[in-house]
Amino acid sequence: MLETDLSYDLVVKEFRKIHTNDICDMQYDKGHNHNGPPWSRVYEYPMVVERIEKHHKGGEIHNSCWGWCGVHVQFKEILDSHFPEKVIHSDIRESDLNGTCIYDITMPPPEEFKERFDIVLNVSTMEEVDHNHLEVFSNLFKQVKLGGVLIATFDLPGLQVNSFEKAFSEEFIVDGVPINGLNSKLSNPNYEHLNCGIMVIHKRKKKLLKRILNFFR
């Protein structure tokens, strides 16, 4: 079950597969390793940046599970340049790069992270964690301040989609031609069996509570 707070509504802005007509940026073709080129990152990273620019209100951003090497460092540098002194990058592994810290997304957030961030990010990691994915989501969503959003991308199969559909009371949308390792503009046939998805979840003050508070002002 998804743990929520009575003071806010959880509003699903997006919950869908990423498809071949989505934005793609080939600058993220770096970071090849023994598994081949980062076929999904050329879609995920520009889509995340686009949504940050749409929803960011000037506050802090938490880039959870940031990745610490390869193309992940490139994405960190782009976030830092786009949003100077606004981004915290966390992972379970320590890094000596500026703006990084240690945090395990399977654990409740520390007090200093609770309802702190305009935007919390998790790029293609939640599905990799051997843990209840709704609990991981809840740990991250607790860090979003009222009016903020959580933006996450994920591989499929991988994410426990059925659990999220029940928790959100929303159907996962499959529209267009889903990207995979083979049809990606940065092809990697090793991952022909995988698709990707994105969720953008808004933490909105409850309308009834807002009306009551306005009445007593």
Image (cartoon, rainbow, N blue to C red):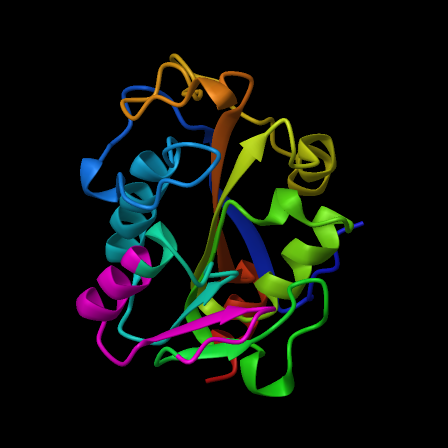
Image: 115 above or below 147:
below
Q: Quadrant of residue 59?
A: bottom left
Q: Quadrant of residue 188?
A: top left
> Where residue 94 sits in the image (x, y, percent)?
53, 76
> Where residue 199 sits in the image (x, y, percent)?
49, 42
**Residues in magenta?**
74-96
| Residue at point 73%, 35% (across, down) | 166
Q: Can residue 15 be seen in the rendering of this structure?
A: no
Image: 142 above or below 53:
below
User: Please, which residue is most extreme toward the right here?
Assistant: 1
Q: Left or right: 77 with respect to 174?
A: left
Q: Is residue 81 magenta?
A: yes
Q: Is residue 89 magenta?
A: yes
> Where residue 85 sits in the image (x, y, percent)?
27, 81
Q: Left or right: 132 with respect to 50?
A: right
Q: Quadrant of residue 156?
A: top right
Viewer-proximal residue, 104 or 59? 104
Q: Left or right: 144 with respect to 29?
A: right
| Residue at point 34%, 81% (across, down) | 98
Q: Left or right: 17 with respect to 92?
A: left
Q: Can residue 82 be seen in the rendering of this structure?
A: yes
Image: 100 above or below 14:
below
Viewer-proximal residue, 193 or 53? 193
> Where residue 215 sits in the image (x, y, percent)?
50, 76
User: Please, which residue is most extreme toward the front here?
Assistant: 34
Counting the numbered discs, the total is: 0
Image: 75 above or below 147:
above
